[in-house]
Image (cartoon, grey):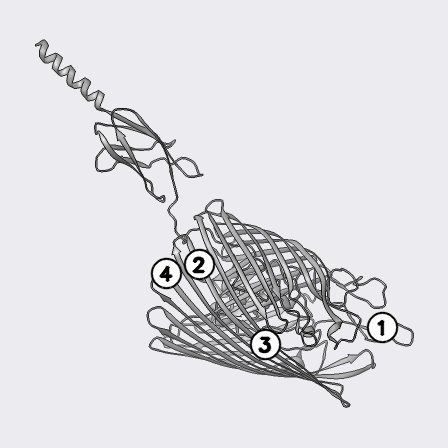
Amino acid sequence: MKQYIFFFLFLISSSLLGQTVISGSVKARNDGTLPGANVYLKGTYDGTSTDTEGRFSFKTLKTGQFTVSVEFLGYESHSEQVTLNGKEIELAIELNETFSKLDAVTITAGTFEASDKKQANTISSLDMITTAGAAGDVFGALQTLPGTTTNGESGRLFVKGGDSDESQTYIDGALVHTPYNSTAPNTATRGRFNPFMFKGTIFSTGGYSAEYGQALSSVLLLNTNDMPVQDQFDLSLLTIGPEVAGTRLWENGAVTATLGYSNLQPYMNLVPQNFEWKKAPESTAAAISIRQKTGKTGMLKIYSSFDNGRFTLGQFDLDQDTMVDYGLRNRNFFVNTSFRTTIGENLTLSTSASFTNDRDKVSFDGNHFDKSLKGFHLKQTAAREITEKITLRGGVEWFTRSLEQTYRTPADTFVNIYDINTMAAFTEAELYASKRFVTRIGVRLEHNDYLNRSSLAPRLTAAWKLDETSQFSMAYGWFYQNPSDAYLIYSDKLNYERADHYTLSYQSTRNERTLRTEIYYKDYRNLTKQGQGEFYLSETYNNSGSGFARGLDLFLRDKKSIRNGDYWISYSYLDTKRNYKDYPKEAIPGFASKHNLAVVYKHWFDKIRSYAGLNYKYSSPRVYNNPNSPEFNGEKTIAYHTLDVSWSFLYKPNIIFYGAVTNLPGFKQEFGRRYSETPDESGLYRSATIVPGSGRFFILACFITFTKKGTENQLDKIQ
């Protein structure tokens, strides 16, 4: 009996001696412990799960070489070889998050993106074109975003202390040489293109990709609509004129054509005007858009437009003390083509091209000024995903720009011409260290044959995701641009102008609420200066100018707190000075406003099937120069205020009535003063106040849509 007991105890002791204890901890790399992770010996049933502190411990009778595996949802699995020989094994395991670009951090420094398909946007593409007061103008709607300054006498984009010609516009990757309509001095303009043709918008106010050059301050990237879903005919009846549009589909393709006519004379006969219009603005516009799918992944887009506008405006000549008729006629032809396809799984090729032919014919006081601009842009880009975490992009492009100016007086004729060819190449890499950190490094090379100058511009952007709702982003880069046409037409001895960008931003998005704050600094150098010589002499101009711009931008968007309501608030603080053009010293430029505020609210009323919009904007006083004062840019305008309202009423499923008013309270608006070029007998320069065309602008419209079902409408275009 004792022999059996001894044998039994021997078996137990042998079993205990053959056991191996495996213990340790599992945590996420740089992000704390992971409770509930599965830890097991591969090929066996031995294993356990981590406790609330990420600890684990289990025993096994196996001996020899085995693999310990660790798995946790949302993280990469971990495998580690161990030797089982009865000795305790202690493991410290760190897991990396599973990477997916769908929920990875994205770079937001200096960028507002609008796309119907992205969920993390601060604004939508519809917001960009339907804000009250924007009057269907993309550039008008952008002026409700931080970083912009409203110049009521211009209507153009002024971004983060940059002049209006420091911003460039691209459609489907190709440059738009003339994005604004032609207008008279000190009268506001608007964008040329129908805002409803765009599905997405990216407005970058600094630190943008190496793909884009020739812009010191900002780029606006407009992406046109893809394939329509049905045949459709739209009729728009507005107080300024009608527009018709038709869409026809075929297999893998579609065409949309639009024709519009506007004449403000009937409107101006009813609404008092501050200007003396001898002939009210009148224009005819036509456009055609073609979409064609090619193969499984290819998409060809062709867009072409033609505009023909004219007006005659009576302006008081301060030097002659008399009224002078300023007549302008503009013809603009534009065509844009893009092709995008995917080769294999990881290579995407994009080709884009644009051509512009723009002609202005101006007459005033017996003189004539004609300007003809022809521009062409061709670009080829390629993007290859090396791994999920590494993407390489690169491309080459060619810009050509030809400008001819003819000035005819009763006594003489002056003609000036220049032609510029610019070749450029860029490359950049987007590198994800994890879902929480991404870096984009790029460089851009350009050569200008007219100036015989080359530039090399490094760009660096990065973003760090703090948690699922918030992140930091930063951007740095050098940005070059040719001097303006006003100088290039007389001199080919100038250099590129340059701005260095430094941007840091924070963004948090939670429960349909977005908070965004951004600080920036821009260092300007090589700005063009005009000396004391005659304006038509090359030696009059040099690149000795400089400047800076720094500021703070705030943006709050809330679509949750108010049922059926949606609002955003944007505020910008700007501190800027520059010494350029004919400035005698460094000074605040006349287009800059220190404080800018916009409050936009939209509300849907179910019971009355209506959508209302409000938009309040404020800009603090801007400076201007009074030649009668010894202090340069020592005068200030009054502060700018406007409250704009709009209302849309869904009368029938396919009929909408729309109304809008700008500056409803009738706030007084003045944009400084203009002065005579020569002093009078007393030695003073005469002046007149610069005012808007009218105190308010009213518009009424009816939108009718015809489809087979009869239920489609254009409400999504105006709400």
Q: Nearer the viewer, mark 1 or mark 4?
A: 4
Say which mark, if any, is on residue 685: 1
Which quarter of the picture shows residue 290? Answer: bottom left
Residue bearing the label numbered 4: 346
* C-alpha separation, residue under disc 1 versus residue under disc 4: 66 Å
Distance from disc 2 to disc 3, alpha carbons, whole Å, reads 30 Å
Which residue is the site of mark 2? 392
Q: Hey, what amino acid is under mark 2?
A: Leu
**Which residue is painted at 27% across and 30% down in the image?**
83
371 or 84, nearer to the observer? 84
Residue 31 in sight from this viewpoint: yes
Q: Do residues under tags 2 and 3 come within 8 Å of each other at their CB atoms?
A: no
Mark 2 / mark 1, whichever is N-terminal: 2
Which residue in the protein does label 3 denote?
Answer: 401
- Residue at the image point whose x is 19% and y is 22% from the top: 15
Task: Identify which amino acid the numbered label 1 is placed on.
Answer: Tyr
User: What is the C-alpha distance between the residues marked 3 and 4?
Assistant: 35 Å
Q: Relative to residue 92, is residue 529 depicted above or below?
A: below
Q: Are marks 4 and 2 in contact (CB under 8 Å)?
A: no
Q: Nearer the viewer, residue 369 or 595?
A: 369
Q: Amino acid at mark 3?
A: Arg
Q: Is residue 187 left or right of residue 203?
A: right
